[in-house]
Image (tube, rainbow, N blue to C red):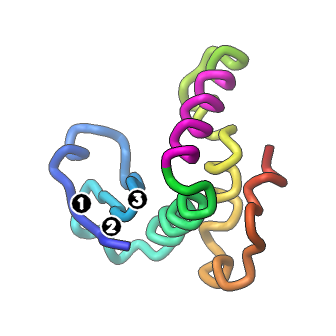
Amino acid sequence: MIIVCQRLLKNTKISGITLFPFILLREKKYRQNKTLINHEKIHIRQQIELLIIPFYIWYLSEYYLKYLRYRNPQLAYRNICFEREAYANEQDLNYLKKRKFWSFISYI
C-alpha cells in the first residue's frame, strides 16, 4: 500500500480512492484519518482477493446496475457490496486481522 496525496482530487468531494496499490487522498491531513485509511485498506484487500481487474469490472458493473435501480448516484455508490463492507467496518481498526476471505459477498 502506497499513500499519495493527489491534486487530482482537490476539486472533488472524494476524500480518498484506492487504485491498487495506491491510496490517493485529497489532502495531506487525511493521512491521519485512521477511519478513512482503514476504509481504503479494506478496498485494497478486496482488490487483491479479486485479482484487481475483476474487482474494477465488478465494482463498475454493480454501480451501474444500482444506478439503474435507484436513479441516484450517491445511493448507487453506497449500495455497492464493496462499499457496504468498507463503510460497515471502517471504524473497526482490527477488522482486517479477523476478516474472512471474500467477506464482501455477505454484503450483496
Which comes sooner in the sequence, label 3 or label 1?
A: 3
Residue at (57, 47) in percent of width and height: 55
Q: Quadrant of residue 54?
A: top right
Give the mark count. Answer: 3
Residue sitting at the far left: 7
Reading the image, the residue beneath label 2 is 30
Reading the image, the residue beneath label 1 is 27
Would you say 107 lies left or right of 92 here? right
Residue at (80, 43) in percent of width and height: 108
Around disc 1, counting alpha carbons within 10 Å, would you say few (fewer than 14), some (14 to 19), or many (20 or more)? Answer: some
Q: Is residue 94 magenta?
A: no
Give the vertical position of 6 relative to 39 (above or below): above
Q: In this view of the protein, which residue sits in the foreground, 35 or 86?
A: 86
Secondary structure found at label 2: helix
Separation (CA) of disc 2 from disc 3 = 18 Å
Whether tag 1 and tag 2 are in contact, CB under 8 A, the answer is yes
Q: Quadrant of residue 6?
A: bottom left
Q: Quadrant of residue 76?
A: top right
Predominant SS along the magenta part: helix
Q: Amino acid at mark 1?
A: Glu
Picture coordinates of residue 68, whole percent (x, y): 66, 14
Secondary structure found at label 1: loop
Reading the image, the residue beneath label 3 is 20
**Magenta residue span:** 53-66
